[in-house]
């Protein structure tokens, strides 16, 4: 469906049905991934089974702007920061939790940008309207008839 439900409806795609099918497929794949983790690596289900990948996935999607390339770049960002957390602790003397702080700051900055974008666009539109009103108030110079 992409970014426009109306276009999808116009070409005959049943939006509600397609959305539910997508959710079901995503949930099934998530369950399959969890099953392979339990049955293939740990051989039993523990209380602390999930290391928080679901919340990390939400943060990656928000940071990536819910677009394919953005999500890929934000996933690489989160992966690199997470992978080097232990090395940062050994080499630079920083706590491994510093990686979480960097990820949280990036996420907060993106969310602030999303919050401020509508306000900035309203201000830009108001500024453009004021400028056009100022220009409309000026009379255009008229050339003398001898030059026409």
Image: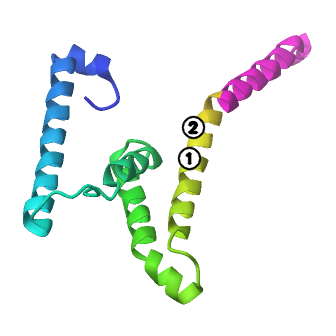
Residue at 29% x, 57% y is: 48
Q: Disc 2 on helix, strand or loop?
A: helix
Q: Position of residue 68 (x, y in %)?
A: 33, 48
Q: Does 86 appear above or below 145?
A: below
The residue carrying mark 2 is: 114
Report the magenta residues as a range: 119-148
Q: Which secondary structure is most common in the magenta stretch?
A: helix
Give the residue number, with chain letter if any, for mark 1.
110
> Which of the pair 17/59 is nearer the observer?
59
Is 99 in front, or is 139? Answer: 99
Who's the residue at 16% across and 17% down the image?
A: 14
Q: Are marks 2 and 1 in contact (CB under 8 Å)?
A: yes
Q: Is 32 situated left or right of 69 in this image?
A: left
The local secondary structure at tag 1 comes to helix
Q: Quadrant of residue 5?
A: top left
Position of residue 4 relative to residue 59, above or below, is above
**Outermost front residue:** 47
Can you give x and y, in whole percent of width and height, for residue 123 in the image?
74, 27
């Amino acid at each position: 469906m992409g970014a426009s439900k109306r276009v999808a409806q116009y070409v005959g795609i049943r939006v509600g049905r397609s959305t539910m099918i997508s959710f079901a497929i995503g949930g099934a794949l998530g369950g399959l991934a969890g099953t392979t983790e339990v049955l293939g690596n740990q051989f039993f289900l523990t209380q602390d089974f999930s290391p928080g990948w679901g919340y990390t996935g939400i943060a990656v999607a928000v940071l990536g702007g819910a677009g394919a390339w953005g999500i890929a770049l934000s996933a690489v960002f989160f992966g690199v920061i997470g992978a080097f957390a232990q090395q940062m602790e050994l080499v630079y003397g920083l706590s491994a939790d510093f990686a979480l702080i960097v990820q949280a700051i990036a996420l907060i900055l993106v969310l602030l940008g999303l919050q401020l974008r509508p306000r900035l666009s309203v201000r830009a539109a108001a500024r453009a309207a004021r400028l056009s009103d100022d220009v409309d108030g000026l009379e255009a110079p008229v050339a003398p008839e001898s030059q026409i």
